[in-house]
Image (spheres, rainbow, N blue to C red):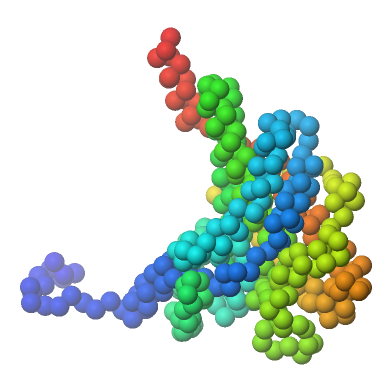
């Protein structure tokens, strides 16, 4: 029936959707099926630096942090997992690269064409996609040219990846706390393995956020207008990831470990929306690293990222590694502290116990 009660004729065509809705639907499909930007072969820190960030974070944990994390096997597992998300990126399968690659960056400048600012972005991943789609329609922005991995046209998902993986770690601790009280030895072992895995995967994205080139469209050489004549080398990203440090003998492991501060619980978010997790704090951290993009390029221009004159460049990058380890340790510690025992699991295990009695 129509709004006025008349029946639509069987022969009548369905009303055509409004152009706005057609374009919006097409763009949402494009984003969800044909996402994001950035080259597939650009990483943040190399594997050795990701491992070392995890070493720093582990060294920051207090003595009362769950002891199973410190066993030799679990420590090595956490260090190894620091490189896991990059292993997903290295696969030839386009669908996996399409899914995973955008989680490793947020190119801040690429928000500007959408007239969006970081503070305006929803902490829900798919609402953020909808914000981009609506802005593209409103501003009549063209769809980007597709690349092989279908990952152009979007600034990236790094803060969402960090927040979501943090919340998965909280969930893992919530289940572990109940299993340790009411579960079987096998259940406890499996729940601990889940915590170790979640700690390791989260670590990678914290490491990415601490490499300033993962916050900018200038991720691999300066692009566009270049009045200060910064490098446009396509090898710049790899040089910062680890090439420079390797060329000068590596980072100072003992010295940096000696400077580790104890992990601390992160402040409660100002937002009263529990679903926001740590999103606001993560976004502020990423913006802080974005502010270091041009100073990093200036260091290179001044010759301070050269093996012949390494002091300033080494200090800069080691500060980023130290910072990354501190933030990661804080997030691990906070996840453990904040995780409430899972009520559903408590109820289930209590019923299971009654059945056995």
Q: Residue 67 in the image: x percent, y percent?
A: 71, 30
Residue 47, horizontal then vertical, whole percent: 69, 57
Quadrant, the N terminus: bottom left
Does any portion of residue 168 appear in the rendered image?
Answer: yes
**How many numbered markers are drawn?**
0
Q: Is residue 256 above or below residue 67?
A: below
Task: Report the residue that reaches farthest toward the top.
Answer: 357
Task: Locate residue 173: give its quadrant.
Answer: top right
Task: Judge left or right: residue 101 versus residue 8.
Answer: right
Which residue is found at the position 63% from the left and 48% from the top? 81
Residue at image x 52%, y 61%?
91
In which quadrant will I find the C terminus? top left
Q: Is residue 323 above or below residue 95?
A: above
Q: Is residue 260 above or below residue 291?
A: above
Residue found 66% across the figure and 48% down from its top: 80
Closest to the observer, 108 or 94: 94
Task: Report the side of 201 relative to 3 (left or right).
Answer: right
Residue 207, position as x, y percentages in the image: 70, 57
- Res. 274 visible in picture: no
Pick the residue in front: 175 or 267.
Answer: 175
Q: Residue at x 47, y 31 (%)?
A: 344
């Amino acid at each position: 029936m129509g709004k006025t009660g008349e029946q639509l004729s069987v022969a009548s065509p369905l009303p055509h959707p409004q152009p706005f809705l057609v374009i919006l639907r097409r763009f949402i499909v494009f984003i969800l099926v044909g996402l994001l930007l950035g080259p597939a072969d650009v990483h943040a820190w190399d594997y050795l630096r990701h491992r070392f960030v995890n070493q720093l974070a582990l060294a920051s944990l207090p003595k009362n942090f769950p002891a199973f994390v410190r066993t030799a096997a679990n420590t090595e597992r956490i260090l190894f997992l620091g490189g896991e998300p990059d292993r997903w990126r290295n696969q030839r399968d386009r669908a996996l690269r399409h899914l995973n690659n955008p989680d490793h960056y947020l190119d801040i400048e690429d928000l500007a064409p959408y007239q969006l600012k970081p503070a305006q972005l929803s902490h829900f991943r798919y609402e953020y996609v909808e914000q981009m789609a609506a802005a593209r329609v409103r501003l009549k922005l063209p769809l980007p040219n597709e690349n092989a991995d279908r990952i152009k046209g979007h600034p990236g998902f790094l803060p969402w990846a960090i927040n979501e993986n943090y919340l998965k770690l909280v969930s893992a601790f919530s289940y572990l706390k109940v299993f340790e009280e009411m579960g079987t030895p096998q259940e406890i072992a499996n729940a601990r393995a889940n915590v170790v895995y979640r700690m390791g995967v989260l670590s990678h994205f914290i490491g990415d956020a601490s490499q300033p080139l993962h916050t900018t469209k200038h991720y691999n050489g300066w692009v566009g207008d270049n009045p200060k004549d910064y490098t446009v080398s396509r090898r710049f990203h790899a040089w910062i990831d680890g090439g420079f440090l390797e060329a000068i003998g590596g980072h100072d492991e003992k010295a940096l470990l000696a400077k580790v501060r104890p992990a601390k619980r992160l402040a409660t978010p100002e937002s009263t929306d529990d679903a926001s997790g740590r999103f606001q704090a993560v976004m502020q951290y990423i913006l802080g690293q974005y502010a270091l993009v041009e100073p990093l390029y200036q260091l290179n221009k001044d010759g301070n990222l050269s093996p012949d004159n390494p002091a300033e460049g080494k200090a800069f990058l080691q500060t980023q590694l130290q910072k990354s380890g501190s933030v990661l340790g804080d997030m691990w510690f906070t996840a453990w502290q904040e995780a409430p025992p899972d009520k559903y699991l408590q109820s289930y295990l209590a019923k299971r116990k009654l059945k056995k009695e």
